[in-house]
C-alpha cells in the first residue's frame, strides 16, 4: 500500500507550490496596489496541492494499468484528465447535483447553531457588507492615533489583544470583519469596531475598476496559465471559476478598509493573520501609505510565508522555534524577524514537580482534535484508530479521556460519531469539550495528544507532556517535525505506541530551556520600538 503523500518530497512540494503561485503575481494590481491574484491564492492551496499530488501519481501508473476507486470523488476528475482516460469506481453514484446540494445543506443545518448559520449566510451572500452596513452603528470619531488590529477570528483577536495589553498608554482599534472575531474581556485600550460600519455605498469607480481587472484576468488565464501544466489543469477543472465573484466582493471589502484609513488616524497595523485575504488588505493599504506594519502570529508556526510573499515590515516570532521555522522553512529574511511573544501571566510547573491533590488531580488524558476534513482527512478513521487506545490507557490508569474540539468542529456531529465508534463501556470514559481553551485543560491533564496542532506548544509551556500522532501527519508543512525538534511534543509512529505512554512519561522532562525556546516574552519597550519603527 502506498500513500500519494509519499510521492513528493516536502521540499519539492513546497518549491513547486511557491513557483506556481508566483506566476500570476503583479499582473492584477488595482489602484491601491492590492494584488488580486495574490489575494485569491489563499483559496487555492488545497486544490493546487491535490493537483501536484495527482500529477505525481499519474507518473507512477503504467499505461496498461486498470484504475479502480472505492467511491466517486472530485479528485478523480483531476486524475482522469491527467491520464486522459476514465476511472471506474466500485460504488455507484446515484445522487444528482440537486440531491448532493440538498444533502450538504441539511448536514450544515444539523451541524451549526442558528447564529452560526446566520454568520455563514452573511459571509456567503453579503461579503461586501452592502446589507450589514445598515445594522451597525457608525464609528465614533477620534483624533487620537491608533494601531489597527484587523481580525476575522477569535484566536487572531486574542493574539493581538495580548500584545495590546502590554502598552496600556497606546490606543488600539480592533476592526472585525466577522462576528467570530469577538472575544470577551478586551483590554481597556482596545476599541472594537465592525468593518461593516465603514462600508461605503455603491461606488461607480469600483465597478469600472472591476471590469478592467476582469479583462486582465482573462488575459492572464489565456496567455500565462496555459503554459503551466498544473494551472492549465486547474482551469479545466473550474478551480478559477469563483474568481469573478471573489473580485466583486473583495473590492467592496477593500473599499471598507480604505474608509477605515480615511476616517481613523491609523499610525500602524498589528496583524495576526496575513493569510486571510480580507485581513491582508489593510496591511497592503498601510504599506502603500508608508505606515508601519507588524505581524504577530496567532499560532505556533505559519507555513504560508513559505509559499506567498511576506507583506509586513516586521515579524514578531514567539520564540526560537518559530524563528527557526520562519527562516529555514519559509525563507523569511532574518532582518525582518524580532523574537518576543506577549508577556502573559503564566506559572507552569515542571511535570516532575506537579502537585497532585483531590481538587486538582491529573486525571485527564486530553486529545486536541482538528478539522481533518479541511485537508481531505477522514475524521471517522482518525477517531476509530485513536479513541479505543486512549480508552484502554484511561482504564488502566484510572483516568478519563477529554476530546477538546477545534473551534470549527461541531459538538453534536462529533458526539454522534463517537457514539457510533465506541462501546458503551468506552463511551463512558470519553467527554467532548467545545469552546475556548480553559485553565482546567492544563491543570488536570496527565498528558495530551494531537496531530500537529499548535496546542502542543501550549501544553508544553504549561508543563503538560504532549504526544504527536505522527502516523496521521501527511502534511508537507512539517509542523510536527519542528515541534519535536524543539521538544514541544514526542512523536508516536502508530496508535499502539499509546500503550507505552506511562513508560515514556518516566523520562519526560520539560525544562526551562525547552520553554525558553518555545516562547520568550518581549519587553514593553521593545514592542513599542517595533510598532513605531525605531
Image: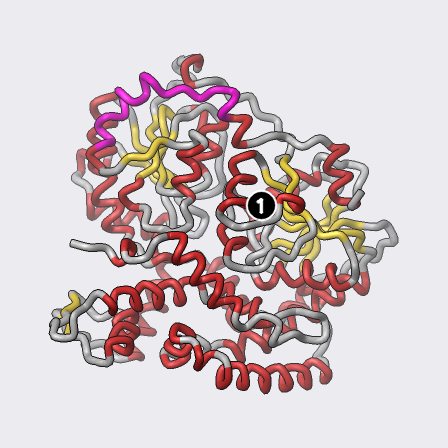
The spot of residue 442 in percent (x, y) is 45, 28
Q: Magenta span: helix, strand or loop, mainly?
A: helix
Is 446 left, or right, of 91 in this rendering? right
Residue 21 visible in the shown view: yes
The spot of residue 488 in percent (x, y) is 43, 32
Q: Secondary structure at mark 1?
A: loop
Q: List the residue tagged with mark 1.
A: 297
- On whether residue 501 falls in the magenta region, the answer is yes
The spot of residue 393 in percent (x, y) is 23, 27
Q: Which corner quadrant of the image does residue 433 belong to?
A: top left
Q: Is residue 395 above or below residue 315?
A: above
The spot of residue 447 in percent (x, y) is 36, 27
In this view of the protein, which residue sits in the foreground, 124 or 503? 503
Is 292 left, or right, of 419 in this rendering? right
Is 337 left, or right, of 466 in this rendering? right
User: What residue is drawn where x is 65% and y is 74%?
Assistant: 29
In this view of the protein, which residue sits in the foreground, 201 or 386? 386
User: What residue is drawn where x is 42% and y is 43%?
Assistant: 479
User: What residue is drawn where x is 50% and y is 84%?
Assistant: 223
In the image, farthest residue toward the right: 143
Is 225 left, or right, of 431 in this rendering? right
Quadrant holding the N terminus? bottom left
- On whether residue 499 falls in the magenta region, the answer is yes
Q: Which residues are magenta?
A: 497-514
Amino acid at each position: 500500500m502506498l500513500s500519494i503523500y509519499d510521492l513528493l518530497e516536502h521540499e519539492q512540494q513546497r518549491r513547486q507550490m511557491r513557483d506556481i503561485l508566483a506566476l500570476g503575481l503583479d499582473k492584477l494590481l488595482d489602484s491601491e496596489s492590492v494584488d488580486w491574484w495574490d489575494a485569491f491564492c489563499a483559496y487555492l492551496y488545497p486544490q493546487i496541492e491535490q493537483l501536484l499530488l495527482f500529477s505525481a501519481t499519474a507518473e507512477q501508473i503504467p499505461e496498461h494499468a486498470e484504475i479502480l476507486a472505492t467511491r466517486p470523488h472530485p479528485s478523480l476528475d483531476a486524475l482522469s484528465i491527467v491520464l486522459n482516460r476514465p476511472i471506474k469506481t466500485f460504488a455507484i453514484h446515484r445522487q444528482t447535483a440537486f440531491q448532493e446540494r440538498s444533502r450538504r445543506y441539511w448536514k450544515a443545518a444539523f451541524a451549526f447553531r442558528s447564529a452560526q448559520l446566520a454568520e455563514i449566510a452573511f459571509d456567503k451572500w453579503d461579503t461586501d457588507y452592502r446589507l450589514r452596513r445598515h445594522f451597525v452603528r457608525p464609528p465614533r470619531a477620534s483624533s487620537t492615533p491608533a494601531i489597527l488590529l484587523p481580525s476575522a477570528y477569535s484566536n487572531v483577536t486574542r493574539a493581538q489583544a495580548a500584545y495590546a495589553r502590554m502598552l496600556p498608554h497606546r490606543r488600539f482599534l480592533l476592526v472585525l470583519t466577522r462576528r467570530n472575531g469577538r472575544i470577551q474581556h478586551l483590554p481597556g485600550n482596545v476599541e472594537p469596531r465592525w468593518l461593516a460600519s465603514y462600508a461605503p455605498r455603491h461606488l461607480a469607480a469600483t465597478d469600472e475598476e472591476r471590469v478592467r481587472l476582469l479583462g486582465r484576468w482573462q488575459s492572464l488565464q489565456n496567455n500565462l496559465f496555459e503554459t503551466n501544466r498544473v494551472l492549465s489543469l486547474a482551469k479545466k477543472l473550474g478551480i478559477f471559476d469563483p474568481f469573478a465573484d471573489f473580485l466583486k466582493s473583495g473590492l467592496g471589502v477593500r473599499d471598507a478598509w480604505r474608509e477605515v484609513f480615511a476616517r481613523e488616524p491609523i499610525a500602524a497595523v498589528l496583524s495576526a493573520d496575513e493569510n486571510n485575504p480580507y485581513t491582508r488588505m489593510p496591511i497592503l493599504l498601510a504599506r502603500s501609505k508608508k505606515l508601519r506594519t507588524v505581524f504577530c502570529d496567532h499560532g505556533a508556526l505559519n507555513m504560508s510565508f513559505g509559499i506567498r510573499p511576506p507583506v509586513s515590515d516586521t515579524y514578531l516570532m514567539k520564540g526560537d522555534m518559530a524563528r527557526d521555522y520562519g527562516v529555514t522553512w519559509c525563507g523569511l529574511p532574518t532582518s525582518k524577524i524580532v523574537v518576543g511573544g506577549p508577556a502573559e501571566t503564566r506559572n507552569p510547573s515542571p511535570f516532575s514537580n506537579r502537585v497532585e491533590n483531590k481538587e486538582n488531580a491529573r486525571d485527564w488524558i486530553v486529545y486536541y482534535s482538528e478539522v481533518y476534513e479541511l485537508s481531505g482527512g477522514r475524521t471517522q478513521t482518525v477517531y476509530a484508530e485513536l479513541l479505543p487506545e486512549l480508552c484502554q490507557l484511561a482504564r488502566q490508569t484510572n483516568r478519563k479521556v477529554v476530546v477538546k474540539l477545534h473551534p470549527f468542529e461541531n459538538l453534536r456531529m462529533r458526539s454522534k460519531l463517537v457514539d457510533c465508534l465506541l462501546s458503551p463501556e468506552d463511551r463512558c470514559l470519553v467527554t467532548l469539550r467545545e469552546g475556548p481553551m480553559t485553565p482546567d485543560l492544563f491543570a488536570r491533564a496527565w498528558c495530551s495528544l494531537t496531530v500537529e496542532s499548535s496546542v502542543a506548544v501550549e501544553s508544553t509551556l504549561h508543563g503538560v507532556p504532549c504526544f504527536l500522532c505522527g502516523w496521521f501527519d501527511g502534511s508537507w508543512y512539517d509542523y510536527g517535525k519542528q515541534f519535536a525538534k524543539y521538544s514541544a511534543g514526542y512523536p508516536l509512529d502508530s496508535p499502539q505506541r499509546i500503550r507505552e505512554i506511562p513508560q515514556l512519561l518516566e523520562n519526560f522532562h520539560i525544562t526551562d530551556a525547552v520553554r525558553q525556546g518555545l516562547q520568550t516574552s518581549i519587553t514593553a519597550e521593545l514592542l513599542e520600538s517595533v510598532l513605531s519603527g525605531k
